[in-house]
Image (tube, rainbow, N blue to C red):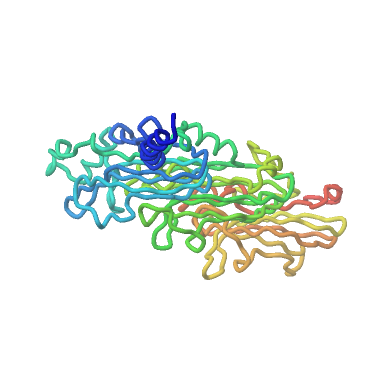
Amino acid sequence: MNKKTLRRFLLCLIPVILYTVTSPLTAQDMVTITANDVFYQPEMTIKAFTLENDAALEIDGTLGIYNDRGRELLFYGWILDAASRKPVWHMLKNKGTYDEEINPFEDSISLPKGNYEIYYTARINNTNVRVGEPPGFLARVFNAIFGSRRTDLFDEIEMERLYLSVSGSSRDIREIDQKRLFDTLQKDAVISINRTGDAQSIKKAFRLTKETKIRVYTLGESQRRNLYDYAWIEDVQNFKMIFQMDRKNEKRAGGALKNTLYDRIITFPAGQYLVYYATDNSHSYPEWNSLPPYDPRFWGITLWTVSPGDRQNVEQIGEVEFPEPILAITKVGNKKNISRTIKLRKSMDIKILCIGEGDPLKKIMYDHGWIAKAGTEEETWKMNGRETDFAGGHIKNRSLCETIRMDRGTYVVGYVTDGSHSYPKWNAAPPSFPEFWGITLWVTNEKNRGSVEIL
């Protein structure tokens, strides 16, 4: 081939090369992951994908909006970062720009390498609606919102047009099993109480062999300073509250305004811990009565070690192990005044736990314990309402756990209750340790146990 012919050939080839380099990926190069079967799911459609590299993705789908009598039914979706548990994209970000019924849309997003989850659901945007009992989620939704006035609504909604898709290069994106991803997140956790339903009270225990930094991640429900679905963690050895979800430390969890989130890192000393999660009788997984949070499956509390290597510091335990007390006046009922006499043959440190009923605002106690020198009016110790901690359950459940030095001698240990809210007839939520309602004493050094006598 002479130079003239070669030059002509190269000039013809350049447009082909440029088109190949600059043209979009062919269908064979693309991977599309679609969430579109929400109508058949009692919860919501969930898909998952992994990005092998930082990548640009294309998003398309439809937002469904249906209104009646001031209430709103939405078909919508979002994308969650599996590691941070934070949303990276949400369909309702610009909901105000859409019209009623089905709204097609397209968007693009760049995401870093990692695992992601796609959610697509149908929910009521109304915190005052309680879903009814008929079977089938959407049937209940439509019953609750529209009643008999809109019996033709099923015919009006083109279900096959409702979906959310994510597309990217096959070099970057790959669909993965969302259930397996969720199972891995649970397996890596210190403790996970998740997907909690209505009217549940769950507790789990674990032990730390040394001080460990732990990520505490919990979602719940609260309104007007009231907690309805919430979590707390107690140090069993010291009967101290390590963490309590409250309005001061929470953030928005996405969806309905009442969805709340706590996500912090706490340093836990070595010891035994009890993790609690309690729910009321509405708005929980999976039967939300309003828009669900961004991370619905983790409705509850989950703990992860900050450093993967610290996972070896953790041991899950079935039951909390309490040491044998030297004296226990516990499971005390209404209108009781109980006392016992104890003799110490030498001076020693005594650990005291007292759980009772009090008013945290007025700093006064109604059910409380005390210790006094026998034969005198000299008070050695008393449960002071100003020093108590929250004991779990209702806020009026109070606890005080401390260690004091007691001299050699004889003492009277007592506990008194009023006419309501005591073991086992509670008129509000019971404390975390109902069996310890009363006063309990332990020696801090087992060598001193032989120097104690109960008279």
98, above or below 377, in the image: above
Is residue 314 rendered to the left or right of residue 29? right
Rendering coords of residue 330 (x, y %): 63, 49
Is residue 294 rendered to the left or right of residue 41? right
Rendering coords of residue 346 (x, y %): 87, 57
To which quarter of the image does residue 123 belong? top left
To which quarter of the image does residue 37 belong? top left
Q: So how many labels did they put on this image?
A: 0
Is residue 375 rendered to the left or right of residue 204? right
Viewport quadrant of the N terminus: top left
Is residue 47 rendered to the left or right of residue 125? right
Residue 405 can be seen in this image: yes
Rendering coords of residue 386 (x, y %): 61, 69
Seen from the viewer's position, the closer of residues 453 and 308 is: 308
44, above or below 393, in the image: above
To which quarter of the image does residue 284 belong? top left
Rendering coords of residue 453 (x, y %): 81, 50
Residue 166 can be seen in this image: no
Seen from the viewer's position, the closer of residues 93 and 298 is: 93
Seen from the viewer's position, the closer of residues 30 and 291 is: 30
Seen from the viewer's position, the closer of residues 42 and 28 is: 28
Q: Residue at x 71, y 52 (%)?
A: 269
Q: Residue at x 17, y 43 (%)?
A: 147
